[in-house]
Each structure stands twice: as C-alpha cells, then as structure tokens.
Image (cartoon, rainbow, N blue to C red):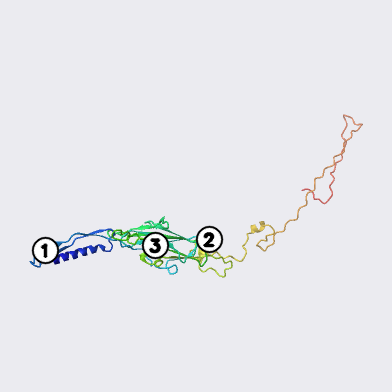
C-alpha cells in the first residue's frame, strides 16, 4: 500500500506540471485529478485509487514583436533595409504598414516610438491604427501604449495582432532637400514590466516591475524595421545636349514618344494667303514674288465754285409809252472763267 501512495503522489505532481502548457492564457485555472488502477500484490485483486483534485493557475509568459505586415524580414538598419522608396519629392507622404504581435499568453501594453537613426533632419513620423478596411484610423499619441491581447487558442481568429501604419512626411524646405538626402524611420516597441517580487502572488504581465523590455527581449536597436527614402531633387538644364531617352508626362509616368514629343517645326516661314498679303500694311512684305499693283496718282482737290457776276440794273426809258413800250433788249451775261491750274469740278 505504501507503493500505491507514492504512485498517486507522483501522478498528482505530473498533473500539476501540465498547467504550464504553451498557448494557455495566463490566469487560466487548470484542475487535474489522477486515477490509478492496479492489482493488489498480496491478493491479485484489481484496485482503483483517485488522487485529490489539484488546481493550477497558469502564469504569464510574455513575448511580443513588431513586424512588417507583408512578412518582410526585419532586424535591419536604415542602410540595410529592403523596404525602399526612391525618387520621392518634397512634401511626399510615405506610408508603411506594420503589425504589433503579442506572442505570449498575457495582455501587453506596447509603446511605439520612432527610431530615426541615420535619417536626415526635417521629416515628421507619426503612427496610426489601421481600420479593418485598410484605411488609417486614429493617430497613436506618442508615449501612449497600445494594448495587444494574446491569441486565444479556443477561437479561429488571431486576437494577438494589432495593425498600425507608419507615416513619414518629407520636408518642403529646399534647404533640407538635396540629391544626397536620405530619410527613414523604424517603429520601436517597448513594454514596462508590472510583475511583483513573487510572481505567484503578483504575476503582473510577467516582466519584472521597473524594467523596460524591448521586442523579443532583445538588446536596444537590434530588432528594427526601417523604411528608407531617397529624395529626387530636380535640376533645370537650359542647354540640353540630347533628347530625353525616356520621356515622361506631367505626372512623371513614362509615355510613348509620339504622345510626349512635340511636332517638328519647319525652318521655312509659314505661307500667307493672298487676301492677307493685300490687306496687310506695306511694311509687311507678302509671301508672293509679284510686286504689289501701282497706286493711281492722287486726284487734285476741286476748285471752289465761281460766283456769277450779277447783271446791271435796267434803266427805264423816258419816251416809252405805257401801251407800246417794250423792254429793252439785254445781251446775255457770261460767267467769267476762273483762272489757275485747278481742274473743273466734275
């Protein structure tokens, strides 16, 4: 019977140890009861023995990370990152999606800050929550932690992921933009520990109180996810020595040559119509080689009309009779012809 008691104690211990199985949420109570069946060594009769019920509370096992949403490998710097944006213009906005991942079994409050090591000055970096439809949601205030719950193995969904977006806005000041400017940033997550001295009494989040833990409990600046941005600074060339090999439209997109290249300009002057040639002032020579028609000579101004000389007044004859008297005969009066070089009025 002594051996049976030892066997039952061993079974109870094994049952208690199974409460630390991976994937079980922290704070979950697990009950284990061991049952043993054996033959009595003295009589050979079958015996059954049941242990006391053992209750075990699962302790926190924290772990978290920040990753590219598209699965690109991280742990890089601004010079080694594979996430690149080239040919950016002043004021351009570059958005990169990331995911906060809770890899543990307890809720974690992750604070996200921007690491801009190696980046030129002048850009602004902000973080936003991402809505289920992929649009940007509320801005994450700097210093305000984002709570990420652990994944519940009892459900089909993954509750341990919170999607965010990093938004970098380039400066517009020409003094901050040059062909050699390089901008970039990486989200850097930290979690403040809340566990007490005795984790069985005050488990907290599993990290020791007063500590600040980096992603995957790694060293500072060793688990980053940079986005690198190079800026294109346009330059004006007043004397191009060749035609552009890759023409683009006003938006910077490549386009076929016939659509972008202007029509060739002829070296000959444009032809002018006969009507234009005859109505233009004499200072503009018409395109035809025929001389313009001669103009008629100017006509002289007409002379003023001459006033006729009035005839002399008739004198009555003293011998005329009132019955047989006749009017005296008058000679026709001629109008004097004006002298000079004027032409007669037509």
Q: Is residue 271 left or right of residue 244?
A: right
Instruction: Judge whether residue 158 can be spotted in this image.
Output: no
Q: Position of residue 123 (x, y in %)?
A: 48, 61
* Label 2: element kind: loop
Q: Residue at x 13, y 64 (%)?
A: 37
Q: Is residue 222 left or right of residue 263?
A: left
* Label 1: element kind: strand
Residue nearer the viewer, 116 or 198: 198
Do tag 2 and tag 1 residues touch (Cβ < 8 Å)?
Answer: no
* Label 3: element kind: strand
Counting other residues with Cα less than 10 Å from the Cα at mark 1, is it few (<14), some (14-19), or many (20 or more)?
A: few
Report which residue position mark 3 lands on: 189
Q: Residue at x 66, y 59 (%)?
A: 277
Label located before the other in sequence (2 or 3): 2
Residue nearer the viewer, 236 or 15: 15
Question: Label 2 to label 1, Cα distance in Å?
Answer: 88 Å
Q: Position of residue 6 (x, y in %)?
A: 16, 66
Labels 2, 1: front one: 1
Label located before the other in sequence (2 or 1): 1
Report which residue position mark 1 lands on: 47
Q: Residue at x 13, y 62 (%)?
A: 48
Give the vertical position of 327 relative to 34 (above or below).
above
Question: Label 2 to label 3, Cα distance in Å?
Answer: 31 Å
Residue nearer the viewer, 142 or 310: 142
Report which residue position mark 2 lands on: 173
Q: Position of residue 113 (x, y in %)?
A: 42, 61
């Amino acid at each position: 019977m002594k051996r049976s008691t030892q066997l039952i104690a061993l079974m109870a211990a094994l049952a208690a140890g199974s409460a630390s199985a991976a994937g079980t949420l922290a704070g979950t109570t697990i009950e284990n009861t061991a049952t043993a069946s054996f033959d009595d060594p003295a009589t050979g009769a079958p015996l059954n023995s049941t242990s006391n019920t053992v209750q075990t509370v699962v302790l926190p096992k924290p772990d978290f990370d920040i990753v590219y949403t598209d699965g690109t490998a991280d742990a890089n710097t601004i010079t080694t990152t594979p996430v690149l944006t080239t040919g950016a213009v002043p004021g351009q906005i570059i958005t990169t999606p990331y995911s906060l991942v809770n890899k543990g079994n307890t809720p974690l409050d992750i604070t996200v800050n921007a690491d801009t090591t190696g980046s030129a000055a002048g850009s602004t970096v902000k973080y936003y929550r991402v809505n289920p439809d992929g649009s940007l949601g509320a801005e994450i205030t700097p210093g305000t932690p984002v709570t990420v719950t652990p994944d519940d193995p009892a459900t089909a969904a993954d509750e341990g992921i919170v999607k965010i977006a990093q938004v970098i806005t380039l400066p517009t000041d020409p003094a901050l933009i040059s062909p050699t400017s390089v901008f970039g940033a990486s989200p850097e997550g930290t979690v403040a520990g809340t566990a007490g001295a005795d984790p069985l009494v005050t488990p907290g989040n599993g990290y020791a109180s007063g500590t600040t833990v980096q992603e995957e409990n790694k060293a500072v600046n060793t688990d980053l996810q940079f986005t690198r941005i190079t800026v294109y600074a346009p330059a004006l060339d007043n004397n191009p020595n060749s035609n552009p090999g890759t023409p683009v439209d006003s938006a910077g997109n490549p386009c076929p040559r016939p659509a972008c290249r202007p029509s060739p300009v002829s070296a000959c002057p444009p032809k002018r119509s006969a009507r234009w040639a005859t109505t233009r002032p004499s200072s503009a020579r018409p395109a035809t080689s025929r001389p313009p028609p001669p103009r008629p000579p100017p006509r002289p101004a007409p002379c003023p009309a001459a006033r006729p000389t009035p005839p002399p007044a008739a004198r009555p004859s003293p011998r005329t009779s009132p019955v047989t008297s006749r009017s005296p005969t008058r000679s026709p009066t001629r109008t004097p012809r004006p002298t000079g070089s004027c032409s007669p009025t037509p």
